[in-house]
Amino acid sequence: MQITSLSNPRVKAAARLRDRRGRDEQGRIIIDGVREIGLALAAGVEIVELFFFSQLCHDDAHQAILQRAGQWRAELIEVSPTVMEKLAYGNRVEGIVAVAMAPRRTLTELTLPAEALVAVVEGVEKPGNLGAIVRTADAAGVAAVIVASGITDLFNPNAIRASLGAIFTVPVCAATADETQAWLRLRNCRIYAARVDGAIEYSAADFRGPSAIVLGSEAAGLSNIWHGDDVVGIKLPMLGQTDSLNLSATAAVLFYEALRQRQPRPDS
């Protein structure tokens, strides 16, 4: 039976997941898009409801999602075009929207390789920035992303969208800045904090062992906790009139420098 009413309780509950209060109250998140839902399923995220508009779900990608979600015992709910437009993100109507249980990830659950590179983002405010950083971390082989004392929640729909679903495949968790720093020290990670007054340029840092790249919010930068004796401040050269880059752009430069250093060097 197709749901056609915008006042349907299940539709209204799903729509409320666009707001953080709704996500916190229900313990659920909303996921748009075939690619994002597919990655969530592959990562073992528990999909509980899958709203779909059948006329947009004839291709193989949509059918695969519907089949896999059904195998995971998600409830498949057919809706009208009007209802799908209400549930979908902005103008992005791909004919399928998922409601999932919010993944619960903690520092103690992170399992990392011995020489892991970890990204720490402190006080991030914009979910789009968080998503872009996670997407770049996925591309550059960063082992995990820790959101330290973040203002936005990890699974804001904007963060999911900006990450292209990588937020489900890259180990991501939230913690306080104090907890994060203690966790890094326990694992003997070299800590590099990106600051405009950094002591060395980023290319002089050694990212080849267990390391952490720490980034602050664009509004406030990094807190004083990241000025300890075992924290090395690194900076990017700024040759123009501005004194800093966009947060996600800074992350991309640093992650790929770390990747460059970590790649096997050809024999001379």
Image (cartoon, rainbow, N blue to C red):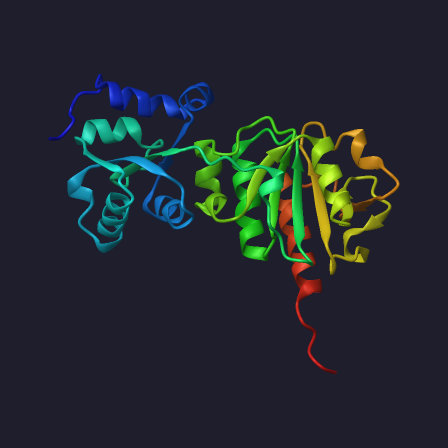
- Residue for point 19% across, 37% down: 53
Determine whether, in the image, residue 45 is placed left or right of residue 190. Answer: left
Closer to us: 9 or 241: 9
Whether 23 is drawn above or below 216: the answer is: above
Residue farthest toward the right in the current orientation of the protein: 229
Whether 209 is drawn above or below 22: the answer is: below
One can see residue 244 in this view: no
Task: State how many labels appear.
Answer: 0
Closer to us: 133 or 70: 70
Position in image of residue 188 (x %, y %)? 77, 50
- Residue for point 67% across, 53% down: 117
One can see residue 19 in this view: yes
Position in image of residue 233 (x %, y %)? 82, 43
Whether 247 is drawn above or below 256: the answer is: above
Determine whether, in the image, residue 81 is placed left or right of residue 180. Answer: left
Residue farthest toward the bottom in the current orientation of the protein: 268
Q: On the image, which quarter does residue 95 sit in?
A: top left
- Residue for point 75% across, 38% down: 182
Q: On the image, which quarter does residue 79 sit in?
A: top left
Closer to us: 46 or 211: 46
Quarter of the image containing the C terminus?
bottom right
Q: On the image, which quarter does residue 173 sit in?
A: top right
Position in image of residue 146 (x %, y %)? 62, 40
Quarter of the image containing the N terminus?
top left
Position in image of residue 203 (x %, y %)? 77, 57
Whether 266 is drawn above or below 58: the answer is: below
Residue farthest toward the front in the current orientation of the protein: 108
- Residue for point 58% across, 37% down: 106
Residue farthest toward the left in the current orientation of the protein: 1
